[in-house]
Structure formats: structure tokens, C-alpha cells
């Protein structure tokens, strides 16, 4: 494969990688992007399971760097499906001719920094692919599937599908006995669709999850027209909210409202649907007592929906609401009212092994024809830890992060010059609307490279002290928050052996943007520069 010499090498052709190509070209940098997929889209290229869709409203889960693009593209649903999001990604790639700078079907195996040459060398399994002054990891927060180790899994004679690497061809479950392991977001979205076709569906649940109805539907053309007329204002408002979503957030404490007032507010939010249910009161993620009021409301809704009280009890989460990422669903709980759908609690009946034709749990064999694994991702750090990344003195990133990720602003890592990460650990990333968060990182990185070129600098590196201080801040701000008390992929709890460290920044998007701006205003405080 041809070796590329360029200014900037990018790993990942999802929404971050595509925007990087666009912006770096504008600034006059030569660029090459690599992706193991055969097309653009990142997580939306791989996650093709039935029912896959975004949990952020489509008009907000979209690029804002080009107003003509915003005005020309028409979303068809309130919450866009995976096919529509992938169609959008391909439209953007074609509109700005991005694919000419992307090498597909090319997984990066290693990225090593050459101190003498002040450049990064990127290789795949066959050899060197690129030498570049700068390397930007746009590998995504949810891009490495978490595959459970289950005794006998390799012996199963039927097809096995993971929601994170779903086949491109349509899978027909008609008449089949299907098992789904996991009840996270991908399972909550796919289970209703699988149940419509399957002869029997058995769901294996370790931890019950909260889900708020999406109330999805076609986007009214007049509403879309109104949104487009005020897109700039909507985007500006979104940047002032904790999660980067334009919505109404109540800052008042839940316990200062009367029970009747809380019930009415929660009902209003439930009927509106979506993730902003947790915006009902300002202390829901700070006070366990306040959180209980919202959790009890949702548990009551589950019990009202699921007809079998015993099944409803199993589906009612025992943990706080919002500790894990809140799910948005379309008919998930109603699915358990179907006669051919059953739910097994893995805490009471753990999976012992998988045979050629069945899953053995609690001493009983459940015969199945195919298996769907919906166990999520090795989030935040998985993609970076799967690449042999070496900085100064051949220092290995896997060693530096052995006890949890250490980074400055989620953008850079001390000891790894000229290496940037988009929405890396220590940034708000997965706690926000990812598209505007990605754009903020891309704009910051590109502005930094342009400033370096103007000043004659060729090397930039995060300072160890600044990195340590920011990592401590990320840890300290998460310590009192309820979200950090729940085992979740935010802490890596879903991956055996992964250090339990709360990885994203809990301070909110506005505070993070302000910090990034202050760093620049103070002469890129926390970074050191040099000229080759």
C-alpha cells in the first residue's frame, strides 16, 4: 500500500475525522485519513442493528460548521435512524469531496513518534502507511465492541451477532428462537424489532436500565422550516447548556416542589420524551433523595406498562436514574407483554455455558437458533489502547494508562508530542451532544496548528504538571456526583479488568469551553512549543 507523507495523519473517518479533513484543507494542511471501515460514518457505519437510531434529536445531532449544509439537508424524523445518519455522513463526504483524502479498509496497528524526525509513523499489519508531522486520533468514544467471555460461546452452531459490528445484509429473524444478551441502549432499541419477527425471544439481563419514550415521528415540514430559520440561535443556546442540547432545563431543587408539582413536571417531561427528562430539576444528579423522586416515577411507568408484575419488577432498575446513560426507547417495555418474549435475570440465573444449540442458565437449557450480543463497548479508551501508540523514548500509551487515562483536556497527552485526541478522556464527550462537542475539539486543534505554523513552531506537547492538574480536577469534580457512584461504561465497569476511573469530564460543556478558551488566551497555557 502506498505510503503517504503529509502534514496531518488522521485515524478515523467518522464525524470527527470528516470535519478534520474539511477544516485542515481550508487551512492549507496536507492530510491523510485512515479507517478500517469501507466507508465514512464511524459508529454509524458499524452499528446497523435493527432499530438503531440516535438518542439526540436529529436537527441537533448534525454539523453546524456550514450553514448551507444545515439549510439544504432535511431530516425526516425527530430521532434519525442509522440508515439516515449514514446517508447524511455520505452526503457530507460527497458534498466536500472528502473521500479523496481517506484510505478505507485500513486499520491502524501502530503509531510511533520519531523524535529525530519530529514526525509520526503510522503502520497497519503490512507496513508503513504514513509519515506525518501531526497525528490526530479521531477514533471515537464508542467504537470498540465489548465482547463477553462466555464458556462455550465458540461452540454455538448458529449465527452470533454483536450489535456493534452488525452485518451489512439484512438479517431475517422470522420463525427463529433468538437470545439477546444485554439490556443497554442497543438492546433496548433492537429488542422490539427482533420480537416482531422471532418465534421466541429470550432476553438475558444483568442490570435493568431506565428508558424514556422517544415519541418519535416524522418531522413536520413547517417545524423544520422554523428550526432552520433560527438555527443560529438554537446552536448558541445549546452551547450554554450542560450537555450541549437546546432544551428547557429547570435549575430549581426537586425537593422544594410539592409531590403534586413533581408528578406533573415528570409527566410533562415523559410526554415530551427524550433525554431531557433529567432536566426536570437541577439537583437530580446531585441528591440521592431528589433522584429517588424521578426514579420512582419511571419505575411506576414501567409497572403500568408491563402486565406481569414479576417481569415488571425485574425490569425496574434498582440504581439511580442517570447513573448509566439514560436510554430512549420505542416500545421496549411493551415488548415484554408478548407471549413469546421472556426475561431472565442473570443475577438469579447466571449463564453457565453455551452449547451447540442452547444457553444454559440456572441449570436450564434454553434452546436458541441465533444469538445477539448487546454488551456495548470498551468505551472512551478502547480504540486508543488497541493501537500500539509510542511517544518520546518509545513510551507506550498502554503503560501510561494502565491505571486509567491521563490526559490534558482530553485533547493531548504529556510525553506524546504532536498527538491530539478528539473527545478523549477528560473531556465532556459522551455526557453531551457529540456532534457540537466534536466540532469544538476539531476547531480548537486546527486553530492550534495554524497558530503554530504562524509562529514557526513544529512541536507541541502537553505539560506533565498541567496534565496531572487537569486529571485531578476531572476526578475531584466527579467524586461527589451521583453519576460516578453507579457501575457503568463511564467508569469502564462493563469491561473485566479495566481500571475503575470515571473518564468523561462532569463539569459540563460551557465550563469546558471556557477552560479551553482560557488556555488559548493565556498563550496555550499547559502546552510547550518548540521549533525544529
Image (spheres, rainbow, N blue to C red):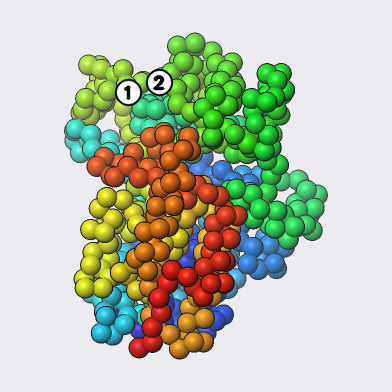
Kind of element beneath mark 2: strand
Judge by depth and name the residue closer to the eye, 130 or 53.
130
Judge by depth and name the residue closer to the eye, 137 or 405.
405
Judge by depth and name the residue closer to the eye, 28 or 250.
250
Q: In which quarter of the image is residue 487?
A: top left
Image position, residue 119 (x, y; %): 32, 80
Q: In this view, does 204 lie above or below 35?
A: above
Q: Quadrant of residue 415?
A: bottom left
Verify CB contact (< 8 Å) between mark 1 and mark 2: no
* Mark 2 lies on residue: 343
Image position, residue 101 (x, y; %): 45, 76
Q: Which residue lies at the image location 68% right of the left edge and 21% below the top edge?
A: 263
Image position, residue 462 (x, y; %): 39, 69
Report crowding for label 1: few under 14, some 14 to 19, many 20 or more residues within 10 A (C-alpha): some
**Which image quarter is the C terminus in?**
bottom left
Q: Is residue 26 above or below residue 268?
A: below
Q: How far apart are marks 1 and 2 (CA)?
A: 9 Å
| Disc marking residue 346 | 1
Q: Is residue 502 above or below residue 24?
A: above
Q: From the viewer's perspective, is 125 left or right of 332?
A: left
Q: From the viewer's perspective, is 239 left or right of 89?
A: right
Residue at the top extreme of this rendering:
309
Report crowding for label 2: few under 14, some 14 to 19, many 20 or more residues within 10 A (C-alpha): some
User: Is residue 143 something that shows in the picture?
Assistant: no
Image position, residue 152 (x, y; %): 19, 33
Q: Which residue lies at the image location 55% right of the left edge and 50% below the top edge?
A: 508
Q: How many labels does the image show?
A: 2
| Disc marking residue 117 | none
Q: Which residue lies at the image location 31% right of the left edge and 51% below the top edge?
A: 404
Q: Which residue lies at the image location 53% right of the left edge and 54% below the top edge?
A: 434
Kind of element beneath mark 1: loop
**Which image quarter is the N terminus in?**
bottom left
Amino acid at each position: 500500500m502506498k505510503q503517504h507523507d503529509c502534514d496531518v495523519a488522521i485515524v478515523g473517518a467518522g464525524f470527527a475525522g470528516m470535519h478534520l479533513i474539511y477544516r485542515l484543507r481550508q487551512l492549507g494542511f496536507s492530510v491523510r485519513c485512515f479507517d478500517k471501515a469501507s466507508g465514512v460514518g464511524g459508529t454509524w457505519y458499524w452499528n446497523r442493528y435493527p432499530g438503531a437510531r440516535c438518542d439526540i434529536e436529529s436537527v441537533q445531532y448534525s454539523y453546524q460548521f456550514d450553514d448551507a449544509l444545515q439549510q439544504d439537508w432535511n431530516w425526516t424524523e425527530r430521532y434519525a435512524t442509522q440508515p439516515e445518519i449514514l446517508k447524511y455522513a455520505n452526503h457530507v463526504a460527497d458534498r466536500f469531496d472528502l473521500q479523496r483524502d481517506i484510505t478505507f479498509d485500513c486499520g491502524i496497528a501502530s503509531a510511533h513518534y520519531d523524535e529525530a524526525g519530529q514526525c509520526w509513523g503510522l503502520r497497519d499489519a503490512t507496513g508503513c502507511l504514513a509519515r506525518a508531522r501531526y497525528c490526530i486520533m479521531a477514533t471515537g468514544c464508542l467504537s470498540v465492541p465489548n465482547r463477553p467471555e462466555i464458556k462455550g460461546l465458540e461452540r454455538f452452531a448458529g449465527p452470533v451477532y454483536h450489535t456493534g459490528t452488525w452485518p451489512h445484509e439484512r438479517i431475517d429473524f422470522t420463525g427463529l428462537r433468538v437470545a439477546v444478551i444485554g439490556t443497554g441502549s442497543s438492546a433496548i432499541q433492537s429488542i422490539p424489532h427482533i420480537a416482531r419477527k422471532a418465534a421466541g425471544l429470550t432476553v438475558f439481563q444483568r442490570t435493568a436500565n431506565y428508558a424514556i419514550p422517544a415519541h418519535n415521528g416524522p418531522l413536520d415540514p413547517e417545524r423544520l422550516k422554523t428550526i432552520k430559520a433560527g438555527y443560529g440561535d438554537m446552536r448558541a443556546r445549546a452551547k450554554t447548556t450542560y450537555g450541549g442540547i437546546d432544551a428547557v432545563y429547570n435549575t430549581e431543587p426537586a425537593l422544594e416542589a410539592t409531590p403534586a408539582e413533581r408528578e406533573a413536571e415528570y409527566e410533562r417531561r415523559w410526554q415530551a420524551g427524550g433525554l431531557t427528562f433529567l432536566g426536570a430539576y437541577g439537583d437530580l444528579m446531585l441528591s440521592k433523595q431528589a433522584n429517588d423522586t424521578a426514579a420512582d416515577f419511571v419505575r411506576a411507568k414501567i409497572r403500568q406498562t408491563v402486565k406481569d408484575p414479576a417481569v415488571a419488577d425485574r425490569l425496574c432498575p434498582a440504581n439511580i436514574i442517570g447513573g448509566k446513560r439514560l436510554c430512549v426507547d420505542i416500545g421496549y417495555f411493551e415488548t415484554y407483554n408478548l407471549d413469546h418474549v421472556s426475561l431472565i435475570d442473570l443475577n438469579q440465573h447466571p449463564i453457565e455455558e453455551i452449547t451447540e444449540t442452547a444457553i444454559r442458565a440456572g441449570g436450564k437449557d434454553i434452546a436458541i437458533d441465533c444469538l445477539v450480543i448487546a454488551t456495548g463497548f470498551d468505551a472512551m479508551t478502547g480504540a486508543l489502547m488497541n493501537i500500539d501508540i509510542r511517544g518520546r523514548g518509545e513510551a507506550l500509551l498502554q503503560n501510561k494508562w494502565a491505571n486509567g487515562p491521563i490526559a490534558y483536556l482530553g485533547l493531548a497527552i504529556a510525553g506524546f508530542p504532536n498527538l491530539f485526541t478528539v473527545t478523549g478522556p477528560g473531556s465532556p464527550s459522551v455526557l453531551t451532544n457529540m456532534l457540537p462537542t466534536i466540532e469544538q475539539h476539531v476547531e480548537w486543534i486546527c486553530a492550534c496548528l495554524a497558530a503554530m505554523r504562524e509562529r514557526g513552531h513544529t512541536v507541541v506537547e502537553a505539560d506533565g504538571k498541567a496534565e496531572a492538574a487537569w486529571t485531578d480536577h476531572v476526578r475531584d469534580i466527579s467524586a461527589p456526583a451521583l453519576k460516578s457512584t453507579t457501575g457503568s461504561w463511564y467508569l469502564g465497569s462493563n469491561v473485566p479488568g479495566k481500571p475503575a476511573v470515571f473518564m468523561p469530564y462532569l463539569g459540563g460543556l460551557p465550563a469546558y469551553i471556557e477552560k479551553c478558551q482560557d488556555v488559548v488566551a493565556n498563550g496555550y497555557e499547559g502546552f510547550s512549543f518548540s521549533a525544529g
